[in-house]
Image (cartoon, grey):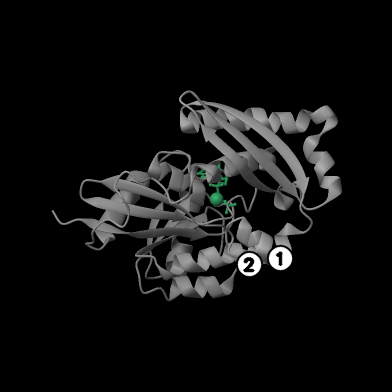
Amino acid sequence: MAHKAGFVNIIGNPNVGKSTLMNAFVGEKLSIITSKAQTTRHRILGIVNGDDFQVILSDTPGIIKPAYELQTSMMDFVKSAFEDADVLLYMVEIGEKALKDEAFFKKIQNSKIPVLLLLNKIDTSDQETLEAQMQHWQDLLPKAEIHPISALENFNVKEVFNRILELLPEAPPYYPKDQLTDKPERFFVNETIREKILLHYKKEIPYSVEVETEEFMEDDDIIRIRSVIMVERDTQKGIIIGHKGSALKRVGVEARKDLEKFFDKQVHIELYVKVNKNWRSNSQQLRRFGYNG
Ligand SMILES: Nc1nc2c(ncn2[C@@H]2O[C@H](COP(=O)(O)OP(=O)(O)OP(=O)(O)O)[C@@H](O)[C@H]2O)c(=O)[nH]1
Ligand SMILES: [Mg+2]
């Protein structure tokens, strides 16, 4: 059989379950997941390899109207995902009516490549609502193929994957067959720490944080990590650290547990907090953190 390969890019509003789906396809926790919007900030590749196929999935940030430069860079990742897709997975969740950004929605309506509309979180719905929603989307996007799924409960995920394989062009692999992602180890350390911050801090704090791993030293039996948590203002530093360091300690303990699973090795983490004034609006800083800002 001929070899198939291509780019399958997942786009949609914030919080609809894009990262959950990518992880379900890949079978690894490549992308962090939280109940907060704007959890994902980068375009992250997840590669699924078989003897005669290579499916290169892209998880992307949820589509928003940018208010500061970091968000503009996030939307640039989404734009790039429109440009190189062989198949677009446009994800919506039950109850949602349309993409908040009209320009992006028009792009999907006018797409020349196949669009699979994935109606996610159907585990939270009843049959009647589901049917009404499917009709709603079919009217808006007559050319799209609609697939109801639950990324969380792995319902219909395999079927969607098989459909993707049918749609992919014949092509040789783009990446080595043992490669799972395009991101380096330090990226997953940064993201795991950021996930704990999204989970445990309120309001603007998680959105003001960036994590940078300064040291990643792997020995035979342990990985030693030193990471810096960057905040925008002095007051945020105290909040991250918490009373006698308790809040920061919790972030370290929980991140370490996840990373030990991810790397399948003992992990030691040291965390620091630094103020990096207004990094979200500073192109030079954004570039340094991999946002091409
Ligand atoms: N009930 C239910 N919840 C889901 C499903 N898929 C994802 N979720 C939940 O929805 C929330 C958001 O999931 P994510 O995968 O982070 O969503 P996302 O689209 O990547 O979000 P952003 O990165 O912020 O754009 C999390 O709390 C998930 O557990 C699903 O099929 N059913
Ligand atoms: Mg995400």
Does the beta carbon at disc 1 come under 8 Å from ligand 1?
Answer: no
Percent coordinates x, y for residue 62 in the rendering: 57, 58
Q: Note whether 205 is above or below 101 in the view shown.
A: above
- Residue 5's mark? none
Circle 1 is placed at which residue position? 68
Residue 26, above or below 141: above
Badge 1: residue crowd in 10 Å (few <14, some 14–19, many ≥20): few
Report the front residue among 277 and 144: 277
Does residue 136 appear left or right of residue 209 in this picture? Answer: left
Q: Are marks 2 and 1 in contact (CB under 8 Å)?
A: yes
Q: Nearer the viewer, residue 114 or 283?
A: 283
Q: Quadrant of residue 198?
A: top right
Q: Which residue has dot 2 on it?
A: 72
Residue 287 picture location, percent across and down: 61, 61
Give the SS element for disc 2. Answer: helix
Give x and y (percent) for residue 182.
43, 51
* Residue 93 rendering spot, x and y as whole percentages: 53, 53
In this orientation, does residue 35 appear?
no
* Closer-to-camera residue (1/286): 286
Name which residue lies at 28% across and 57% down: 5
Q: Which amino acid, mark 1? A: Tyr
Q: Nearer the viewer, residue 110 or 123?
A: 110
